[in-house]
Image (cartoon, rainbow, N blue to C red):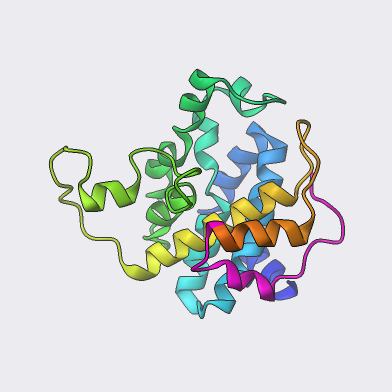
């Protein structure tokens, strides 16, 4: 985790990344702290998956900014201390795609804008948001086929790692509306939900106390 913290500090100091993270911090401190934890977890998980060099940096930046889109949705929905109703869920589900234009400004990290939105698209059916990248690529929606360049395998893998880190942190963290789940129970759940990558959690030490 020490290496993850070092890389995170280096990336946070970048003049292109820092303003976006500052926007997130000003918007909601809890979301900002969650994003930092997800990035640390994703770096460790990515290392375990063989990511290194620029691809590891892209993964880390995408993980740091995976929830940047929440800046563009109703803040009352983001900060609601209890379950969301159907309209609020629809509003919240805008957030993965809402920050794509901002992430496109990161010229040094040209794939971050494609990795970050995958943090809800690549989980199990019960967690995946609608109009997912998978749906676009398989063209199951009945809409015209997407003509954008195909998503490289490593980008999809990076998105799945961010999804795993995001889900792990959400379950082990204390929230106003829930207690933290036991770490061993969380890992068991993720082995069922995300079997292709959950083994990477074996290389991740659990936090000493539940995050908030």
Residue sitting at the far right: 209
Quadrant that contains the C terminus: top right
Q: Is residue 210 left or right of residue 106?
A: right
The x and y percentages for residue 113 are 40, 52
- The magenta stretch is 193-212
Please name the residue shown 35% across and 45% down the image: 132
- Decide: is 146 above or below 85: below
What kind of secondary structure does the magenta stretch mostly adopt? loop
Please name the residue shown 68% across and 62% down the image: 187
In which quarter of the view is residue 74 placed?
A: top right
Q: Is residue 4 left or right of residue 127?
A: right
- Decide: is 17 above or below 45: above
Q: Check residue 68 for magenta coloring.
A: no
Please name the residue shown 48% across and 60% down the image: 160
Question: Closest to the observer: 72 or 170?
Answer: 170
In which quarter of the view is residue 98 placed?
A: top left
- Decide: is 48 above or below 120: below
């Amino acid at each position: 985790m020490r290496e993850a913290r070092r890389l995170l500090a280096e990336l946070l100091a970048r003049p292109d990344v820092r303003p976006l993270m500052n926007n997130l911090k000003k918007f909601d401190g809890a979301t900002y702290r969650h994003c930092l934890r997800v990035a640390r977890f994703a770096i460790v998980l990515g290392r375990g998956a063989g990511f290194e060099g620029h691809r590891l940096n892209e993964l880390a930046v995408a993980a740091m900014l995976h929830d940047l889109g929440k800046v563009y949705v109703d803040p009352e929905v983001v900060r609601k201390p209890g379950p969301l109703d159907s309209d609020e869920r629809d509003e919240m589900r805008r957030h993965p795609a809402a920050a794509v234009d901002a992430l496109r400004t990161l010229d040094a990290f040209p794939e971050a804008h494609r990795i970050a939105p995958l943090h809800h698209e690549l989980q199990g059916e019960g967690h995946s948001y609608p109009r997912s990248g998978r749906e676009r690529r398989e063209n199951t929606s009945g809409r015209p086929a997407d003509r954008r360049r195909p998503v490289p395998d490593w980008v999809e893998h990076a998105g799945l790692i961010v999804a795993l880190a995001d889900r792990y942190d959400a379950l082990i963290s204390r929230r106003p509306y829930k207690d933290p789940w036991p770490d061993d129970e969380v890992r068991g759940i993720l082995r069922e939900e995300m079997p292709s990558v959950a083994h990477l959690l074996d290389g991740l030490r659990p936090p000493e106390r539940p995050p908030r």
